[in-house]
Image: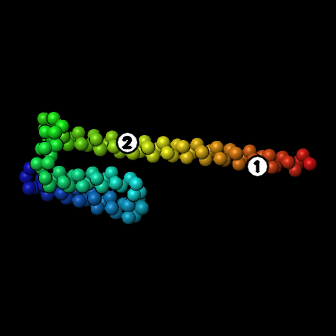
Amino acid sequence: MSTHQRVVAAIFALTLLVTIIELVRRRKLKEEYSWLWIMAGVGALVIGLNYSLLETITRLIGAGFTSSALFFLGIFFVLALCLQFSVKISKLETQVKNLVQHISLLEAEKSVAQQEPHNK
């Protein structure tokens, strides 16, 4: 990997990290979602500065080319992101169900309370 490519990779990774930190600071990205992005940025920085690490990863996963290993890592990152969002969606779905049940009970109580004065 040429020096120019390493510099470009390092600039990309540092830009990603600064952007993530800035989004968290401005409250545009919640901390619970930022950890995965920070790991991706740090991983990109480490791999960009240490090409031999990418070659080692390529050999470990049995890929023929370093670009194949990068695609593998990218797909793994997307799967981790999907898993994180699936967990969050499941939690939110449960919260919505509980809220709907609570609102239904409150409306039923309100309906009963409104009917009681008419019965007396």
Q: Residue at x 33, y 40 (%)?
A: 79
Which quadrant holds residue 82? top left
Q: Residue at x 74, y 44 (%)?
A: 108
Q: Is residue 95 left or right of residue 11?
A: right
Q: Marks 1 and 2, Cα distance to the nearest angstrom?
A: 41 Å
Question: Residue extending furthest front?
Answer: 60
Is residue 67 visible to us here?
no
Q: Amino acid at mark 1?
A: Lys
Q: Residue at x 42, y 61 (%)?
A: 27
Q: Secondary structure at mark 2?
A: helix
* Label 1 SS: helix
For the question of whether residue 115 can be seen, the reply is yes
Q: Position of residue 62 (x, y in %)?
A: 15, 35
Residue 86: percent from the left, percent from the top?
A: 43, 42
Task: Note whether 106 is above or below 58 in the view shown.
Answer: below
Going from the N terminus, do you reach mark 1 or mark 2 first?
Answer: 2
As displayed, is residue 69 above or below residue 22?
Answer: above
Label 1 crowd (10 A; few <14 / some 14-19 / many >=20) = few
Q: Is 55 placed left or right of 12 in the picture?
A: left
Q: Position of residue 60 (x, y in %)?
A: 16, 39
Residue furthest to the right: 120
Left or right: residue 16 compared with residue 25: left
Count of marks, rendered view:
2
What's under tag 2, amino acid-wise? Cys
Could you say which disc has been placed on residue 119 in the image? none
From the top left corner, tell me how far across and down residue 66 is, in percent: 14, 41
Q: Can you name the residue that lies furthest to the left here?
A: 2
Location of residue 65 by image quarter: top left
> Of the numbered discs in the image, which one, if any, rests on residue 110?
1
Name the residue that disc number 2 marks: 82
Please name the residue shown 40% across and 64% down the image.
26
